[in-house]
Image (cartoon, grey):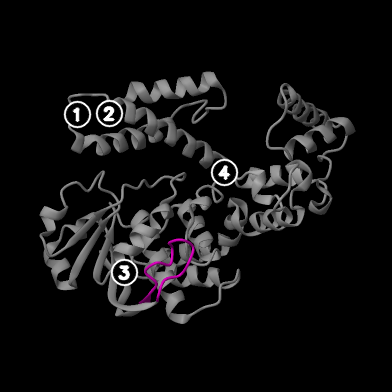
Amino acid sequence: LDQISSRVEMASGEETLEDGEEEQAQRAEMLMAAYSSHGGGPQKRKAELPVGKLGPRALLGKLRRLDPDPMNQETYAPEGANELDKDLDTNALEEDFELTRQHFCAEALDKALGPLREEIRQLQASMKPDAGSRLVEIVPSSSWPIEPDMLQDGEDGVTTSVELSIFLSDAAAARDLRQLKLAGIRRVLNCSPQTVRDTGPSFYGPSVEYLELWQDDMPDYCVLNDFDAAWTFATAGGACLMHCEQGVNRSCALALAVRMKLLQLSENNEEDLGAPMEALRAAWRHVAVRKQRVLTNPSFQRQLLLFARVGFRWFPSLSSVWCTPQERRMARFRAVAEQVAKRSVCGWAAMPHSSWWRAIVFIRDSVVRAEQKVQSGAFDMGTERAMRQAQQRVQDFA
């Protein structure tokens, strides 16, 4: 049992195993589970080694298990190091591992969000069924400080003041031209052009700027990957409407992120790991008392807390650290589905180029939903055979 425990502990700390070792490690896990379930030995696995006693490769492996985004050994290699396996910066690895485990991974974010989720649930349960306006003011009209280049090249731009306001709505309110005119809307950001297809530049006219973000309201979707585009558009001046189909998750998440960032800039808050929860709480409550259903997607909630914890901004390297293992499998399946859809759509001569992206997104998002109904092996692409089967399902749907 000690040998099995040692093998499993070593396997859990490595990124990859040699040929045959992965199968041995999986068998060791099964043997340990079977041994414990029959009462023949300890009921718990051998305790993990303290982080300080793990080697650099084991630390890197554990960090990758929490955050599988591209991360190589060179990131932690001191300048001039030749043998990366021996010269990794252990202190940097320990710091990143603890920070990710305690503040950035899905488990840590869900734990921190627990009390706030219950607070919002009780708040919204007390509202009347028809309470709340379809057009919700997220950011009141005022002169707000803006850093135009804050997300470019890693340096903040010159802060300027811009007169702006931001509203949130569902698709029905986005079609109400009279209401939009009364609110002085000059920009419309559509986060669900897949379903809200009857608006656009010709619908709103030349006096209103229009932008589409093709987002999906699913657990694996990284809605904040579009924060840069949403920020630039919404803070360009004047009144901006951000909407999706129901105004509950996609547009709401981006609107809350923009509100938090504007308030952070105006109050000149110091970035730390304590204030972000209060910033999210204030923004979430601000909308929750005005709209009965807001931000019901748990993964979007995690992304917003992570957004606040890293200084009210977003980076491509954060695309999956907030995901649960199942959400990562879904995201990988989504990426494969998009590639298969591109080959199918772009290879069909009868399809006009202007309709390519709409068809690709329709196939991608629809097949992700269909995959959830698969009884066994949903989102499984762990073997070449499973990958081929998944690709064939997408191809058949396309």
Closer to us: mark 4 or mark 1?
4
Kind of residue sitting beneath label 3: Thr
Q: Position of residue 105 (x, y in %)?
A: 60, 52
The answer to whether residue 293 shows anywhere in this view is no
Separation (CA) of disc 2 from disc 4: 29 Å
Residue at the far front: name it: 80
Q: Nearer the viewer, mark 2 or mark 4?
A: 4
Circle 1 sits on which residue? 351
Q: Secondary structure at mark 2?
A: helix
Image-based side of 321 in relation to 205, left or right: right
In the rendered structure, which amino acid carries the disc numbered 4?
Answer: Pro
| Mark linked to residue 235 | 3
State the residue at coordinates (66%, 54%): 101
How many labels sit on residues? 4
In the rendered structure, are the residues bearing label 4 and label 1 in contact, judged by CB atoms less than 8 Å apart? no
Q: CA distance from mark 1 to mark 3?
A: 36 Å
Taking depth in this image into account, of 36 and 245 the one nearest to the observer is: 245
Give the residue type at disc 2.
Val
Q: Is residue 140 above or below residue 119?
A: below
Which element is circle 1 on?
Answer: loop
Q: Is residue 300 above or below residue 355?
A: below
Q: Are marks 1 and 3 in contact (CB under 8 Å)?
A: no
Q: Marks 4 and 3: which is nearer the front?
A: 4
The label shown at residue 345 is: 2
Q: Which residue is labeled 4 in the image?
A: 70
Q: Tell me the residue at 25%/47% (across/down).
A: 193
Amino acid marked by disc 1: Met
Q: Which residues are magenta?
A: 145-158
Main SS, magenta region, reads: loop
Give the answer, above or below, for where 85 lies relative to 105. above
Disc 4/disc 1 C-alpha distance (Å)? 35 Å
Give the mark nearest the N terminus, 1 or 3.
3
